[in-house]
């Protein structure tokens, strides 16, 4: 009898176990991935300088033109958590003949004087974000119970709302020179920008309708906080708003387009700026 039952027992053991797919809780991915973004940003400086005895619009010293700048980000991502390092570099210059008199950085430029001007702003920092709510997922929030009757959203649709904190070092410098009088001023200040904010990410598969593009992701976020001078100065504000749309041509690569505003009230030791850099951007994203 044992010899007759042995083949039956082996056959049953080789069959896969029955799974209740509808109620199964998928294992949380423990794999890390790297997201690398490199972009061309086309911002312009907006706002007012306020350290010359009164407000001076950035257009007055001819520092308002769009300038192509490079920006980038490297993010380490695991499930809901993302830790990113980012940075950008912006520089512009101007000059001409003053139509109206103005004073900037202690240099009084009279009407009709020839002058030159320069401005630069570079930034490097880090951002940590965490998905707080995924309404289309089996576990919408980290503290929620898995849905027993969960059905995945059609077309691979995902929606996530996240919170974020960030810290950036912003270094700003400005030069103004009156060629007629020979007076000039070269000033710079640095600030630590600490911000908290929130955003959302929405994506869906498109391969069935658009074979060239397999997926589209839309992301928007905003943050607000404090700008702390590294040297002397007063506490100010810092803000950041970003939005972009990504077109994924494969799992590892995408092209994206968007808009970014970085600004605040910067009250430093020798220079004060109530303004921002803002403009369109375009770039590529690679996943490793």
Image: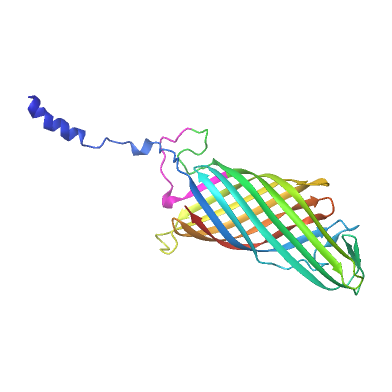
Q: Please say which color scheme the image uses.
A: rainbow
Counting from the top left corner in percent of width and height, residue 227 is at 75, 47
Give the side of residue 166 with respect to residue 149, left or right: right
For image coordinates 70% across by 57% down, the residue present is 122
Q: Quadrant of residue 114?
A: bottom right
Of the pair 56 and 208, the residue shown nearer to us: 56
Look at the image and say whether residue 123 sits in the magenta stretch. no
**Which quadrant of the figure has residue 45?**
bottom right
Q: Left or right: where does residue 115 sit relative to residue 150?
A: right
Residue 101 location (% of width, % of height): 91, 68
Residue 205, compared with residue 236, is above or below; it is below
Q: Is residue 155 magenta?
A: yes
Q: Tell me which residue sits at (80%, 61%) in the image.
A: 174
Range of the magenta residues? Answer: 145-161
Using residue 154 as the reference point, say whether residue 20 is left or right of it: left
> As drawn, which residue projects farthest toward the top?
1
Q: Residue at x 20, y 33 (%)?
A: 13
The foreground one among 10 and 198 is: 10
Q: How many marks?
A: 0
Residue 254 location (% of width, % of height): 49, 59
Q: Percent from the top left, x then y, of residue 125? A: 65, 49
Q: Nearer the viewer, residue 145 or 261?
A: 261
Query: Quick one: quadrant of the N terminus?
Result: top left
């Amino acid at each position: 009898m044992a010899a007759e039952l042995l083949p039956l027992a082996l056959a049953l053991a080789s069959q896969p176990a029955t799974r209740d797919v509808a109620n199964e809780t998928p294992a949380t991915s423990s794999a890390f991935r790297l997201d690398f973004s490199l972009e061309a940003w086309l911002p312009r400086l907006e706002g007012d300088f306020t350290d010359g005895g009164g407000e001076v619009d950035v257009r007055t010293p001819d520092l308002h033109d769009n300038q192509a700048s490079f920006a980038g980000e490297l993010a380490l991502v695991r499930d809901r958590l993302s830790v990113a390092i980012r940075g950008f570099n912006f520089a512009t210059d101007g000059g001409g003949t003053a139509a109206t008199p103005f004073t900037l950085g202690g240099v009084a430029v009279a009407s009709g004087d020839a002058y030159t001007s320069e401005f630069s702003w570079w930034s490097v920092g880090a951002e940590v974000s965490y998905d707080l709510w995924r309404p289309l997922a089996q576990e919408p929030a980290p503290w929620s119970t898995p849905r027993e009757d969960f059905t995945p959203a059609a077309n691979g649709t995902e929606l996530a709302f996240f919170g974020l904190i960030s810290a950036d070092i912003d270094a700003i410098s400005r030069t103004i020179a009156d060629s007629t009088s020979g007076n000039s001023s070269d000033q710079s200040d640095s600030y630590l920008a600490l911000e908290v904010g929130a955003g959302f990410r929405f994506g869906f598969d498109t391969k069935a309708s658009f074979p060239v593009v397999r997926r589209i992701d839309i992301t928007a976020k905003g943050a607000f906080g404090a700008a702390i001078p590294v040297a002397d100065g007063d506490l100010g504000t810092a803000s950041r708003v970003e939005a972009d749309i990504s077109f994924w041509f494969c799992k590892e690569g995408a092209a994206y387009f968007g808009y970014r505003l970085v600004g605040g009230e910067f009250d430093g030791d020798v220079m004060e700026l109530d303004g921002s850099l803002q403009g369109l951007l375009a770039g590529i994203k690679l996943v490793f």
